[in-house]
Image (cartoon, helix red, strand yellow):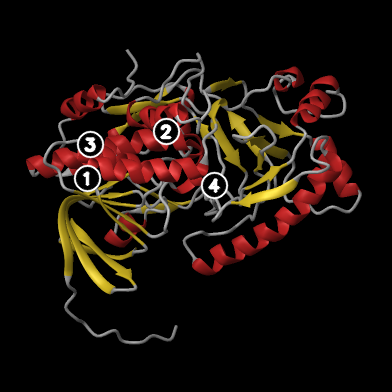
Amino acid sequence: MKTVFEPSREIPVRTEVDVLVVGAGPSGLMAAQSAALVKGTRVMLVESRGILGGNMTIGLPLLGFLGRKGNEVIKGLPLQFVERLREKGLATHHRACPLHVSLTMIDPEGTKRLAFQIIKECGIELLMYAFCTEVIKEGSQVKGVIIESKKGREAILAKCVVDCTGDGDIAYRAGVPMVYGNPDGIAQPPTLMFSMRGVDSRKLRDAVADHPDIYDIDFIPNEFFRADDNCTFVGFRNQIKKAREAGFHLPVERTIFMTGMAPDEWWVNMSRVNGVDATDPAQYTYGEMVSCEQNAEIVRYLKTYIPGFENAWVDRVAPFMGIRETRRIVGEYVLTENDIFECARFDDSIGVASYPVDLHHPVGGDCSLYWCPDCYDIPYRCLVPQMIDGLLVAGRCISASHLALASVRVMAPAMCIGEAAGKAAALCSQSNLQPRQVDIKKLQEALRAEGVYFRP
């Protein structure tokens, strides 16, 4: 490979903080807020895009707030966030679902506004349009990051850094051991969400409920969908088959769309580009282009084969693909699918999750779901990387197996993990401790004080 030489230079220090959170998605927002609520903690949040909220802004429902018994298992700051949206009519209730356990619809634009409001309320220093391109280290200790923006290269120093990039960018650059995708090195595929308006929702619901012989639904009885309530339609395999026989080119085996906030609004989750590595900008670019092409064919399919969509139109397209999986750290503990299926308990639990293992196959166009009998603990050690100090990781890049990640990756658990990471980082900064030295009991007490749910 041809290379060029980059001369060394002095880099100005933009600021020094106690806790630096990189990435303002669901986990990053919770991490920054949680850290800032520890009195005397100076917190900075850095985001590469011009919006806050990450995957909460692309039309996806929040999955995983309820457990298999119908009880709220994600509480604390994530639940407070949703309740504030609900007070403004910008979120729905948590509806129990036989397939996805529960789902909560939120308004993407309202989510962005609330995120800015929380940043202001908590006194968090926010910097957007900046990429973290390098890590500042002394031995094994992360001391901060180098950012790149239109202003040039700058340094941000911090007592503790929380990597909420989703792709483990900071951990990767710090030298943390990482894994990628499944055992063959292939990740779950990404999807570019879009919404359609003008859907005759009553016609859709009644057609599905009245004709289960025609409109096949995965796992859930068709009558479930008659009620005007939150839901995700997953199935219509017969319709996919008919469309393909008629010459349609569809990337998935199932039709997936879900309610929006408006009565005639439905968000579609059907594009799929297998083999895309979202940590490679060339592949990410390719994925966005192919997803756009796929969505045009998906719209044509919905209008032709799904009742109620005949006169619908595309209203909004997500600003970026939703990424399900890329890098994961190797932490002090690796959460496994057996932990999920066995409802594992851990002494260092920082919360629980109950969402099923929801695997979008890395090869092919289908999905598989495997349910946890109740709920499982998320151990703090999954947030603590091996070998490197001064760093915590939250969100979909925590230490988990490929299958375990397919459960813990969704937004409600990610928010729970972010809250714990931010609190731990603040405790580290106040006591001059490394993340692996945190007093777990003290951390758990602080999380309980914020309303985080722990199993009795």
Within 10 angstroms of label 4, few (less than 14), some, or many (20 or more) residues?
A: many
The residue carrying mark 1 is: 123
Q: Residue 379: where, in percent of width, then height?
A: 32, 31
Q: Extreme left residue here?
A: 431
Residue depicted at 57% across the width and 35% down the height: 358
Q: Amino acid at mark 1?
A: Gly
Q: Answer with the quarter of the image where residue 59 lies.
A: top right
Q: Is residue 310 above or below residue 225?
A: below
Q: Which residue is mark 4?
A: 58
Give the crowd class for mark 3: few <14, some 14-19, many >=20 residues within 10 Å. many
Q: CA distance from mark 2 to mark 1?
A: 25 Å
Secondary element under disc 4, as helix, strand or loop, is loop
Q: State yes or no: discs 3 and 4 in contact (Cβ < 8 Å).
A: no
**Rendered image quadrant of residue 418:** top left
For the residues labelled 2 and 4, say whether their Cβ atoms are less than 8 Å apart. Answer: no
Mark before the other along the chain sequence, 2 or 4? 4
Is 125 above or below relative to 352? below
Q: Which mark is residue 413?
A: 2
Q: Residues within 10 Å of mark 2 (few under 14, many from 20)?
A: many
Q: Nearer the viewer, residue 164 or 317?
A: 317
Q: Earlier in the sequence, mark 3 or mark 4?
A: 4
Q: Measuring 36% from the left and 58% from the top, which residue is drawn there?
A: 169
**Residue, disc 3:** 423
